[in-house]
Image: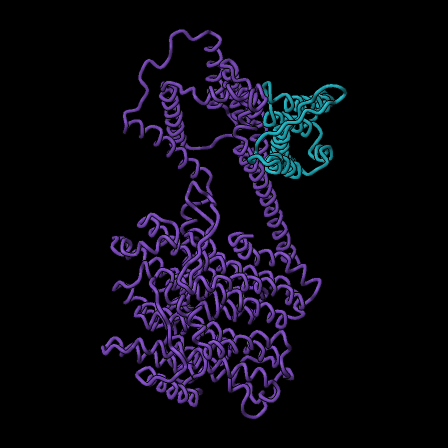
Chain colours: A purple, B cyan
Amino acid sequence: MDVTALTFMALALPFAAALVAPGLTRLLGHNAAWVLAVAPAAIFLHFLRFLPDVASGEFVTGGYAWIPSFNVSFSWLIDGLSLTFMLLISGIGALIVLYSGGYLKGHPQQGRFFAFILLFMGSMQGLVVSDSFLMLFVFWELTSITSFLLIGFDHAREAARRAALQALVVTGGGGLLLLAGLLILWNVSGVTQLSLLLSFGSEVKESPFYLAALLLVLGGAFTKSAQFPFHFWLPNAMEAPTPVSAYLHSATMVKAGVYLLMRLNPVLGGTPEWQLLLPLFGVTTLVIGAALAVRQTDMKLMLAYTTVASLGLLVMSIGLGSPHAIEAAALYLVAHALFKGALFMVAGILDHETGLRDFTKLGGLRSAMPLTFAIALAAALSMGGLPPFFGFLAKEELYSAFSAPNFRSALFAILAVLGNALMFAVAFAVALKPFLGPRVKTPKHAHEAPLLLWIGPAVLALKGLSIALLSGLAHRFVSSPTASAIAGEPRTVDISLVPHLGLPLVLSALTVALGVAFYLNLARLRAAMAAILVDIGWGPDRGFDQFMRGLVRLAVAVTRRLQGGRLDVYMTATFSLVAVILLALPLRYGEFPRAPFFSADVPVHELAIIAIAVGGLFAVVVASDRLTAIVSLGIQGFAVAVIYLLYGAPDLSFTQFMVETLSVVVLALVMTRLRLSPADHRPLPEKARDATIALACGLGFALFLLRATAVPFDRSLTDFFNLYSKSAAHGANVVNVIIVDFRGTDTLGEIAVVMITGLAILALVRLRAGSLKRAVVAEADETAVEERA
Amino acid sequence: MKSVIFRTLAPVLTSLMMLFSIFVLLRGHNEPGGGFIGGLIAVSALAIYGMAHGVETVRRAIFFHPMAIAGAGLLAATSAGLIAIFAGVPFMTGLWIYPAVFGREVPLSTVLLFDTGVYLVVVGAISSIALSLEERGGE
């Protein structure tokens, strides 16, 4: 098979795996993880084959036409950036599936969980390889939806439901902004594919719509990647089971925004707006995220806030845009996915084995869980940016970006050091505190985690060490192609573990020193942060609730205003508008029919039928009670049916007869049900108003029809149907052939509507009867209570 | 309604109208008629029967819930369209077969299946509305 077909299968594989996951789990229990992990592993291996090509600076595109008439395709772009993401997603994905096997062992819904996580994996893969805008957007929103399902997995708890909804509203809403941004980019450049868009950088930047496109794209990226002030959904998403936090909310999904910024850097980047907004929001997020992490004692929450901080760091370095900053972003992206994924899984292991997630209540676990301790330590060393781990390289590269001797550089350097030092302290609080010190009693008796649980974090932690030791290889195949793709021009990353004296090393040393100081004073720092937060009192999280409440209130107010529930108001409004349209538009454009309206020689029998119709209408108007009026309305309807018959439309006439009959029956039934007073009790002015509206509508329709029939009749459709009805569709009745064959899809839609209407009316009839019955029962209860009293 | 004449005639009238509605449905492709009109006639037949003998009798007579009938119709119409896809032609393309029944060639088509679907949807949905209204109205 060729590469295109194989790649398509690789992209579809997670969805197929999700389909079989529940059944497989029922069959094999938690061991289904071993089978299901084969899918992401196979994808990982498939994408490895692109490494040599991509390392030599090429990129691979492929795909299939989807809606060619709209220039929409299902196509992918594999360059350094998407390949790195792809390998992270599938590689970590395989480990996460294994980890979920151990973590949710025996959970009644484990199969569903596997299905959700594989669905997410498929969406995320699609997102990072998408070449066409539409596909990017669809997969972008799919990740939001699957994330919603995963956060709300434990849907019996209210907190989980709220967190899921919040994440969906924030990231899904951001996705809509992204869609608008992509539409602007499409309009400006005229292309719908990222690979083509990359060469339109200067056109986009000079366009007057540049700022609008930038702000919309940033709206999508910042919400997805939890930048301040949209960061609040990410910590709340920790309601999800830990495998989800480790996968979606550290390694992959939250990086989607970062991915987008990296992808569009050659198109949108480098302008003053870009270099102002991204570093500003990035560094704010970094410092606030790290500070909030210190405030927490729940290890998952601490890690979540440091993830917010790390995302800020990435956004900042993309925004700074200097060669060192771009390379740092590429390195940190990989480093963060590895160490944060591992640390989350360690936190999950501790939770699983001890029943606690609060690091202040844990201690002395090193002898019981030596392997977990080693993994945690390795990941924390990388997160703290210490050699010989990959995190060290990323941080050194970042600090090299601050070498310019100006105020801006110095400011960012100070804030970056501060944020990194806080993260250092948090990393070791998670990796050291639960393991050192005297043994503390825990709800569950702790012992080493089973293979399924430790294998994932162990591989990630080892990876963080090995790619730093073999940095030449890692840079050649991963870091350099990624940095080149972000920058839009060839870049070579060559940082290594060999010490190189200079500003970066000084800043690193400062970070470590500050980090150790923070670590030693963590309790004091936490108290101080708590006090500050209490003083502020308000946060975006509460703001979200206020926003949602306000939205609901607005919706209720608008609905009450527009939908008062009085049928006569609706009818008056509708028909007044119809009359205005029918009369005002011809008046405005001078399109009234020209006299004479009627030909003089109307046959007598036609005149007679018209007289019957008019007589029927007269009967309706003068009828003393409603039932008579309804039946009289039928006279006019039958007269119209006869007119159809005379003009050679038997089908139409036939239908009109039946519809008239049935509508009289149904209307009569409705009238008996409504228990209205039999006669009409409207006061005279109201009658006059309604009569005016009715006459205006009638006049309008009459003039409209006269004008429309005065236009020469276009026979092309008639001729087509007459010609092909018998020969192509084997039917002599053209009307019926149109309904069931030529325009059959229309009819299918119409009968679906008939069916839905029937259901709705049935529900309304039942509902009304039910509520009446309930009211009667309630009244009876009340009387009974009164009687007893 | 209490009129003895009406009560006696209603079943005869209903069965004749039912037969007629099917006749109208089947002839629709070549002469005036079709699923929609046929369905309306059938509903009128049921309405007459309901007026004469009460809603419960009609419900027993049609055996299925009216909405189930409408659902079956929608299913029939949709599958009539889908058959074309499995035959490798675009959705909703009419396909014809001409089996010989008792020595006579009978033209059958997915179009007829589709029209039958329309018939059933109309019968189900509208009779559901009429019956539920009639039922409550009698209380």
Query: Does residue B64 sit above or below A217 in this rendering?
Result: above
Going by the picture, which residue comes out furthest to the right? B102
Q: Is residue B123 visible?
A: no
Between residues A141 and B131, which one lies in front from this camera angle?
A141
Query: Residue A416 at what x, y percent from top left?
Result: 34, 78
Between residues A344 and A189, which one lies in front from this camera angle?
A189
Going by the picture, which residue comes out furthest to the bottom? A438
Quarter placement of the C terminus of chain A: bottom right
Between residues A727 and A346, which one lies in front from this camera angle?
A727
Tell how many labels.
0
Query: Residue A327 at what x, y percent from top left?
Result: 36, 71
Q: Is residue A655 left or right of residue A518?
A: right
Residue drawn at 51 percent across, 52 percent down: A4
Query: Does residue A396 sit above or below A628 in this rendering?
Result: below
Between residues A532 and A344, which one lies in front from this camera angle?
A344
Query: Does residue A503 sit above or below A238 in this rendering?
Result: below
Query: Residue A633 at what x, y percent from top left?
Result: 51, 23
Residue drawn at 48 percent across, 17 percent down: A613
Q: Is residue A261 visible?
A: yes
Q: Is residue A616 left or right of residue A156?
A: left
Query: Does residue A483 sit above or below A297 in this rendering?
Result: above
Query: Residue A735 at what x, y percent from top left?
Result: 53, 22
Q: Is residue A519 left or right of residue A772?
A: left
Going by the picture, which residue comes out furthest to the left? A406
